Amino acid sequence: MYPSSFFNAFETSAVERLLADYNLPLHIYFTARFRCNTEKFQSVLARHYPRSQICFAVKANPCIGAIRVAQAAGLGVDVVSQYELRAALKTQIPGWQIICNGNAKTNDYIDLAVKSGACIAADSESELKLIDESAGRQNRKAQVLLRIAGMPLAGLTSADQSTASEWTKFGIPASQISSIFDRVRAMRNIEILGLSAHIGTQICRPAGYEHLLEHLLAQLSDLIKNGMNLRVLDIGGGYPLNYLSEAEWTRFKSRLRLQLAGRLPTAEWVTWNGLPMGYEHLKNPQIEETSDWLGKAYWSPQPGAAILEHILTYVLSDGTMVKERLKQLGEPLLIVEPGRALIGSTGITLARAIGVKEVLGCPVVILDLGVVNHGTVLISPDIYPVEVYPPKPNDAAIEAFIAGRLCFTGDMLSKVKIPLNRLPARGEVVILHQTGAYCADHFASNSCGFPRPAKIAIDEHNAIEIWRKAETFEDVFN
């Protein structure tokens, strides 16, 4: 199940040095793998549509170190707050390589975006007015994209991570775009460069991107025909990362179906407390039992850059390939924003086992780590490959749920039963793979008084850079 062994990342001696030099839990990122992931996206774009820009979504790993690695790989950045924007500018990323997103931009954020020459993805008509006023005060021309939402894209990922469907707080409904353009013409301090959309994260089925491109390109074409000089198209990200192999994913879904049908004893359940996950819809008696998984998935036939290649070579309903349609529309700059797909596979998290218990016949491994230090599991139950370090010759594979250390019931690091090489003894190191995106920051807090762990990066020469120091007692309680 593990995408790569801990030993493949760096030498055993380096592992022991980390354990001696750093407290656990610890988040670790391998910068060489980031470059490898980036090169795959760059290769796809070079072959199919060179007039493009890859932007690293800073929210996936918000720190100067990650921005610096992205910059060295030739990427721009997508930011969602004035703080991420300040970090990008501090790293000397030029404004024209920065996209400013977010549904609640403060005046400070808008003012800094205009001043720096960044491109602002406007989220509403009222925000457009604020951008126009800010640019007027600064005697500048604001560079703007209109972010589109309100498209029939539900069911592609978990509902709380869908960002372009009809029920979303993001963007301008597609039905209003044409009328807004008429009113934008009166705003003298704004230049509309093009359109933007972002459909969510961990989008495993290419159909979502097919629907998106049909809508976006039709809208772009209509606006250009009506005299708008649009030359940028930002199609966002959400490109998936495979947390499981195809066989593991198929087996998990099959077992979950048996569980939900009441055909597995509790000790063999594969989700915590009977969680239906992507089969929630099967509770509706009007839905066929053969209906497949809906929502956030954990395996894709086209992960990462492969799904971008599918997007560019997809044949639209008018019989034209996407990349050819873009050329027909004047070859606008194409912006893509892989976040998880660039950095997710670069990270591992180390934590010590506190112990093992049994709940209703199911093994539960308890770690000295909590969900507020480990990612998106608070909103959707991710499935991270896990192993006990070091592996031993007599290891006996077993499945277990993974629980955290915090004093609330929802603190489950895995609500899915995870294969382990063995059950850990108290004090042994447990490694969680594929944790490079969101895990260290998305819900990071000091719940129960725990300090936040350190983040470090390791390059191909085993050189270590601290991306974030571990917090101390004094940091939390002073």
Image (cartoon, grey):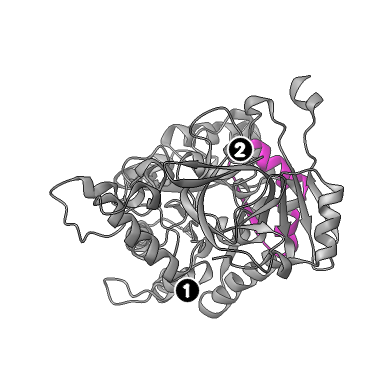
Residue nearest the observer in this picture, 158 or 165 = 158
Figure quadrant of the N terminus:
bottom right
Going from N to C along the chain, the mark reached first, 1 or 2, is 1
Q: Position of residue 143 (x, y in %)?
A: 57, 47
Give me the residue at 41% from left, 76% from top. Answer: 313
The answer to whether residue 149 is magenta is: no
- Tag shown at residue 309: 1
Residue 231 position, x and y percent, is 49, 61
The C terminus: image quadrant: top right
Q: Is residue 71 magenta?
A: yes
Q: Position of residue 92 (x, y in %)?
A: 77, 51
Check the image and report above or below for 390 versus 368.
below
Q: Nearer the viewer, residue 176 or 429?
A: 429
Disc marking residue 370: 2
Looking at the image, which is closer to me, 112 or 403? 403
Q: Amino acid at mark 2?
A: Gly
**Quarter of the image holding residue 44?**
bottom right
Amino acid type at circle 1 is Glu
For the residue pair 405 and 334, the one nearer the viewer reads as 405
User: Mark 1, residues whose alpha carbon is within 10 Å: few (<14), some, or many (≥20)?
Assistant: some
Q: From this view, report whether residue 111 is shown above or below residue 414.
A: above
- Helix or strand or loop: what does disc 2 sit on? loop
Q: Which residues are magenta?
A: 68-94
Q: Is residue 453 left or right of residue 110?
A: right
